[in-house]
Image (cartoon, rainbow, N blue to C red):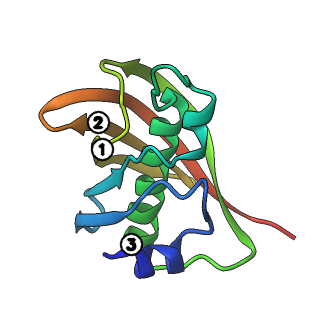
């Protein structure tokens, strides 16, 4: 899935769109996506100017965006302007290595269960072979007025 297909699925836009490409997706099971991290990211101006590091919460957001793409694919739906995909919880978040400009994040997200409109995922983000971030994510879709 390239950036044009991602833009059709996710409502996020610059500077918060954090998925550049989907490498693989297995309906109802897993997704592998990437985020290319560049010095031009707006958060690097303040986090931290002398040693730029990607905020951990943005790594979690990137995994959640990949999880949303997996959820939409699993349900066979394309969200509309009245559909919002929210975090419902984050458990066990661990940050193992800093992510710096020039790194490429590979996000592996697995659907653990789907019940009553709540999706539970396990996500691991790597830079090369090194784990950068891991967490269990709970998300839900809601229709807004």
Q: Nearer the viewer, mark 2 or mark 1?
A: 1
Residue at horizontal 54%, vertical 31%? 57
Give the label on residue 84, or none. Answer: none
Sooner in the amino-acid sequence: mark 2 or mark 1: 1
Which picture quadrant has residue 131? top left
Q: Are marks 3 and 1 in contact (CB under 8 Å)?
A: no
Sooner in the amino-acid sequence: mark 2 or mark 3: 3
Give the left or right position of residue 54, taking residue 31 as reference: right
Front position in the image: 116 or 59 = 59
Label 1 crowding class (10 Å Cα cut-off): few <14, some 14-19, many 20+?
Answer: many
Give the label on residue 105, or none. Answer: 1
Q: In x, y percent, where is residue 107? A: 30, 46
Q: Nearer the viewer, mark 2 or mark 3?
A: 2
Give the label on residue 73, or none. Answer: 3
* Residue designated by label 2: 124
Q: In x, y percent, where is residue 18? A: 48, 54
Q: Are marks 2 and 1 in contact (CB under 8 Å)?
A: no
Q: Residue furthest right?
A: 145
Front position in the image: 133 or 138 = 133
Q: In x, y percent, where is residue 92? A: 42, 20
Residue at horizontal 24%, vertical 36%? 126
User: Label 3, label 1: how many angstroms apart (C-alpha)?
Assistant: 21 Å
Residue at horizontal 59%, vertical 76%? 79
Q: Are marks 2 and 3 in contact (CB under 8 Å)?
A: no
Q: In x, y percent, where is residue 46? A: 63, 28
Label 2 crowding class (10 Å Cα cut-off): few <14, some 14-19, many 20+?
Answer: many
Badge 3 marks a residue whose secondary structure is: helix
Image quarter (top left, top right, bottom left or bottom right) of the C terminus: bottom right
Q: Nearer the viewer, mark 3 or mark 1?
A: 1
């Amino acid at each position: 899935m390239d950036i044009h297909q991602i833009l059709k699925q996710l409502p996020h836009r610059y500077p918060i769109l954090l998925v550049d490409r989907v490498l693989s997706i297995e309906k109802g099971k897993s997704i592998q996506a990437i985020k290319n991290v560049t010095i031009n990211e707006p958060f690097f101006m303040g986090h931290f100017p002398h040693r730029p590091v990607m905020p951990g919460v943005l790594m979690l957001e990137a995994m959640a965006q990949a999880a949303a793409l997996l959820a939409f694919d699993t349900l066979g739906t394309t969200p509309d302007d009245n559909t919002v995909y929210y975090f419902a919880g984050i458990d066990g978040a661990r940050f193992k290595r800093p992510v710096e400009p020039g790194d490429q994040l590979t996000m592996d997200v697995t659907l653990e269960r789907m019940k009553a409109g709540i999706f539970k995922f396990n996500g691991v983000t790597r830079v090369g072979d090194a784990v950068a971030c891991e967490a269990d994510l709970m998300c839900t879709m809601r229709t807004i007025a």
